Image: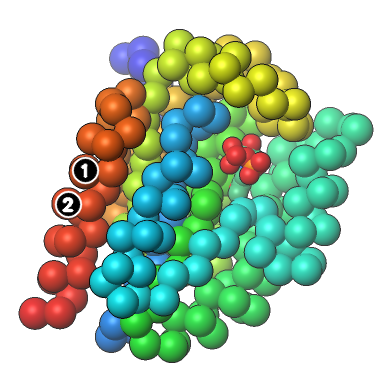
Amino acid sequence: MSHSSNDNFEQFLSDNQKLLSVFKSPVFASSYFLSIEGIEGSGKSTQLAFIKQFLEQRNLRVLILREPGGTTFGERLRQAVLQTQSVLHPLAEAHLFAASRAQLLHEVIIAELSIPNTVIICDRYIDSSLVYQGKARGLGYQTILQIHQNFPLNLVPHLTFLLEIGLETSRQRQIKRNNPKDYFESQGDHFYKKLIDGYADVKKMFPGRVLAINGEQETEQVSQDITAALEQLLDNNHD
Ligand code: TYD
């Protein structure tokens, strides 16, 4: 990251402390809200399956939700965005994702977390909007934060696993997979570079919540890093 954009980001942080402070994790005695983030090929799906199994062994009830989606309305929005033939305005994208998220919070997340010993894991959440729409689409972080500042959109996970990989690893893993590309995935390297920079910023925006994990490591090592963080989270809350 260049010196000047770093300075701009530091300025953004100091200008927006009040706005950042409205984002809170929901308070439930024995239930947890988690999310997992990363660019294509970061290993989210593999680690999600691992986290689910790990938590179920601890007798927790685990629900995995994907964003956008997770409700009937959200799945329709997902189709609308990811299969659109026209290029959407970034503000339209941001509001569509936020609409899906608000409905998911209202219909599923809050209701389920009120049941003891539940863990909700979101495959992508607000950080994806900050990074994809705020950074890569150029809308700015402040706009995304403002869209989310009111309840229930101001609810953020207790812990977010950010699987970090470089551009080259993402490209190699995409070639191996050879999946058809969606609306975002068909963007070039320039877009992916912005995603990587955006996630680095998000880490600094929410240092207590976002845990960066080196996704370039062997799958087992990534899982071990995740396990250590989960154990700490579960132990802390049961003291
Ligand atoms: P998905 O097929 O779930 O991608 P992945 O397997 O990479 O998670 O598609 C979700 C796409 O939507 C992904 O490219 C990221 C993008 N997205 C946003 O741009 N903003 C958001 O707020 C969210 C939740 C997702």
Q: Amino acid at mark 1?
A: Asp
Task: Report the residue that reaches farthest toward the right.
Answer: 85
Disc 1, disc 2: CB below 8 Å? yes
Residue 89 can be seen, yes or no: yes
Among the 4 quarters of the image, the one containing residue 114: bottom left
Q: Residue drawn at (50%, 43%), measured in percent from left and top?
A: 45
Describe residue 122's horizontal placement relative to residue 230 as left or right: right
Q: Amino acid at mark 2?
A: Ala
The mark found on residue 228 in the picture is: 2
Near mark 2 (Cα within 10 A), the count class, few <14, some 14-19 or many ≥20, is few
Describe residue 54's horizontal placement relative to residue 81 as left or right: left
Describe residue 160's horizontal placement relative to residue 145 as left or right: left
Q: Which residue is mark 1?
A: 225
Q: Element under label 1?
A: helix
Residue 227 or residue 37, whichever sits in front: 227
Split into quadrants, the picture shows ligand 1 in the one at: top right
Describe residue 180's horizontal placement relative to residue 119 as left or right: right
Instruction: Give the quarter of the figure containing the C terminus.
Output: bottom left
The mark found on residue 73 in the picture is: none
